[in-house]
Amino acid sequence: MSAGNHGAAVAYAAQSFGATVVVVMPETAPATKVAATRAYGAEIRFARDTTKLMPIVDELCASGFHFVHPWDDVIPGTGTIGLEILDDLPDVDLVVVPVGGGGLIAGIAIAVRAARRGARVVGVQPEGAAAMRRSLDAGTPVRLERVETIADGCTAPSVGVLALEIVQRLVDDVVIIPDDAIREGLRFVFERARLVVEPAGAAGVAALLCGAVAVRPGERVAVVLSGGNIDPARFASLVAPS
């Protein structure tokens, strides 16, 4: 199940091995992500929103499919992002990472903290999709009944059990920010770095800009821009002056 990025990746891998794959996506998934997933040969089944995906997944598992978990199963792969950060910036002090279900930040935290024990890893979530923040506060996975944010890549309605355990142990904090801040981060990345990212990908920069993540004097900072899969028309509407 996926809002788009994980689904496209699994579809690509399945095509490489000649395997059959079904991706369960919300009806609100960006058209570019739907098109990419189909182009890699996946069948797509839609649910009304991300909170309604799991019942369809359960039906598929009951019929013989294997569930590739979008958070816990990706942790070894996302750890390679942490290794790449360390290759480019071995003395990194702070890594800021967008968070959905926790798979991305869990893998990065394992890699970074293994090599740089004193480095801080901080996650960022939208206010309208704060499953990880709420799970950390509760000490156990919390399932959201409603998800509402412009950052579709962060719309996980729950978190991975393994991902949560790793975040509890290795991540310094997970902050939440409003969509308006994410929109400003999106504009900043486009105007200053000339990069097209999706709202979830701009969340880390947005958190730094609005002060939700404070940088200590002299810290060397890396920010993960976790996706650029966004429809052109939607991107234009988000970066246009309000």
Image (tube, rainbow, N blue to C red):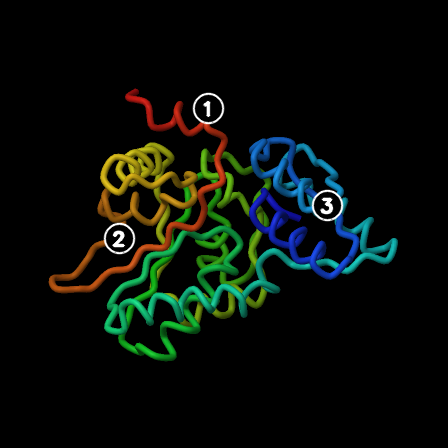
Q: Distance between the residues labelled 1 and 2?
A: 30 Å
Left or right of 202, for residue 130: right
Q: Do the residues labelled 1 and 2 touch (CB within 8 Å)?
A: no
**Residue depicted at 30% across the width and 43% down the height:** 206
* Precedes in sequence: disc 1 or disc 2: 2
Q: Where is residue 203 in the image (x, y as percent from the top left)?
A: 36, 45
The 10 Å Cα crowd at callout 3, few under 14, some 14 to 19, many 20 or more, is: many
Return the mark for residue 233. Answer: 1
Left or right placement of residue 19 versus residue 13 in this view: right
Q: Position of residue 124 (x, y in %)?
A: 38, 51
Label 1 residue SS: helix
Which is more toward the observer, 12 or 198?
12
Residue under numbered circle 3:
42
Mark 3 residue element: loop
- Residue 197 lies, with reference to residue 11, above or below; the image says above
The label number, if any, that marks residue 209 in the structure image:
none
Give the mark nearest the N terminus, 2 or 3: 3
Measuring 73% from the left and 45% from the top, which residue is drawn there? 42
Identified by mark 3, the residue type is: Ala
Q: What is the distance, in whole Å, between disc 1 and disc 3 at their CAs?
A: 25 Å
Pick the front one: 193 or 187: 193
Q: How many marks?
A: 3
Residue at the spot of label 2:
213
Q: Is residue 27 above or below residue 177?
A: above
Residue 58 locus on image (x, y percent): 78, 51
> Residue 157 in the image: x percent, y percent?
57, 46
The quadrant where residue 146 appears: top right
Quadrant position of residue 126: top left
User: Amino acid type of disc 1?
Assistant: Ala
Gap between marks 2 and 3, in whole Å? 38 Å
